Image: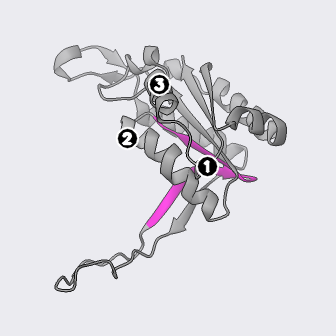
């Protein structure tokens, strides 16, 4: 696969290049190592593209995971203890929250990476919430979000979000004081 788009959110590109260049090089190496062509294996059953061959996001993710693991990147989980003191006085829950956690796809030397071939909400959540949480929990300093560009998303199932849409929204959202530096990489075949 190859990088087709680069967006620096809150100085992400500049900070990663200056302070985490070796990790960025590993990420770039991983991207070009993944052979995207071998993942065009899904026959669409969707109304708008019945019978069309599509790229299979889960299969691409699996290859990314193998490549990151080969280079000693690890998934990282933060256990969650959900508060109950905010329930109204006459509400009692029977739900249990044992084993709840937040997980980042890959972490190494204070760099967090998410590979996202899913719905738009997950991209926004990763950058605007999850990466901030992992920073506040002293796990990462910077983040990298790897997403498809529109051209590749068009060759996947419907509802897969894409780089151009994500960048537009981040540009128009602006930066908040809690946002961390994130490099958004748009990839294609």
Judged from the image, the secondary structure of the residue bearing numbered disc 2 is helix
Find residue 117 and report its image quarter.
Answer: top left
Spot occupied by residue 44 in the image (x, y as percentages of width and height): 26, 21
Which numbered disc flags the more N-terminal residue, 1 or 2?
1
Residue 115 in sight here: yes
Query: In which quadrant of the rendered image does the N terminus lie?
Result: top right
Spot occupied by residue 43 in the image (x, y as percentages of width and height): 29, 21
Query: In which quadrant of the rendered image does the C terminus lie?
Result: top right
> Is residue 102 shown in magenta?
yes
Q: CA distance from mark 1 to mark 2?
A: 19 Å
In the rendered structure, which segment of residues is drawn in magenta?
101-116
Question: Label 3 belongs to which residue?
Answer: 168
Looking at the image, which residue is at 49% across and 32% down?
60
Question: Label 1 belongs to which residue?
Answer: 106
Looking at the image, which residue is at 66% across and 26% down?
33
Which numbered disc flags the more N-terminal residue, 2 or 3?
2
Q: Is residue 134 above or below residue 80?
A: above
Question: Label 2 belongs to which residue?
Answer: 121
Judged from the image, the secondary structure of the residue bearing numbered disc 1 is strand
Q: Is residue 126 above or below residue 91?
A: above
């Amino acid at each position: 696969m190859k990088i087709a788009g680069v967006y620096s959110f809150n100085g992400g590109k500049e900070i990663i290049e200056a302070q985490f260049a070796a990790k960025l090089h590993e990420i770039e190496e991983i991207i070009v190592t993944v052979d995207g062509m071998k993942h065009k294996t899904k026959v669409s059953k969707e109304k708008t593209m019945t019978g069309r061959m599509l790229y299979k996001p889960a299969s691409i993710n699996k290859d990314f995971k193998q490549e990151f693991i080969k280079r000693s990147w690890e998934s990282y989980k933060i256990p969650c203890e959900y508060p109950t003191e905010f329930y109204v006085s006459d509400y009692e829950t029977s739900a249990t929250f044992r084993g709840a956690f937040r997980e980042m796809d890959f972490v190494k030397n204070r760099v967090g990476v998410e590979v996202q071939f899913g719905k738009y909400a997950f991209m926004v959540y990763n950058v605007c919430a999850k990466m901030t949480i992992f920073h506040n929990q002293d796990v990462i300093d910077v983040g990298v979000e790897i997403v498809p560009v529109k051209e590749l998303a068009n060759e996947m199932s419907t509802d897969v979000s894409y780089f151009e849409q994500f960048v537009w929204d981040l540009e128009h959202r602006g930066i908040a004081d809690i946002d961390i530096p994130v490099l958004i990489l748009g990839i294609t075949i």
